[in-house]
Amino acid sequence: MTHARVTAICQSFSGAEVSGTWGGGHDAWKGGGKMFACIGAVTPGVPVKTDRVASPAGAV
């Protein structure tokens, strides 16, 4: 998943904000002050926070 695609998905959530918590092109997406997704500058992939293990399958 590209950085642009992750940005587009995360921006679509109401109240979502991006911050450069770690710098160097790493974006941390937050809602209500809590991080729900992040993307790094080098390795493709997006860790996401969910409410249960079964949730990630339908996340994107």
Image: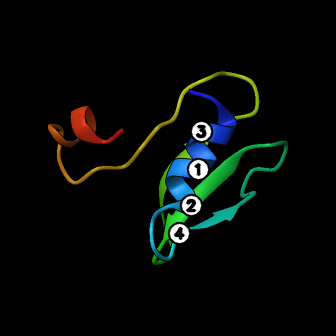
Nearest to viewer (mark 1 / mark 4): 1
Are circles 1 and 3 on residues that touch, CB within 8 Å? yes
Residue identifier under label 2: 11
Q: Quadrant of the C terminus?
A: top left
Q: Nearer the viewer, mark 4 or mark 3?
A: 3
Which residue shows up at 20% across the image and 42% down it? 55
SS class, disc 2: helix
Residues at circles 4 and 3 in contact by the CB criterion of under 8 Å: no
Q: Earlier in the sequence, mark 2 or mark 4?
A: 2
Residue 11 on image: x %, y %: 56, 60
Quadrant of the snapshot with the N terminus: top right
Secondary structure at numbered mark 1: helix
> Is label 2 in contact with label 4 (beta carbons under 8 Å)?
yes
Sequence-wise first label, 3 or 2: 3
Looking at the rendered structure, the kind of residue marked 2 is Gln
Q: Position of residue 35 (x, y in %)?
A: 49, 60
Query: Vertically, is 49 above or below 1?
Result: below
The Cα atoms of the two marked residues, 1 and 4, are separated by 11 Å
Cα–Cα gap, marks 1 and 3: 5 Å
15 over 54 or under it: above or below: below
Q: Amino acid at mark 1?
A: Ala
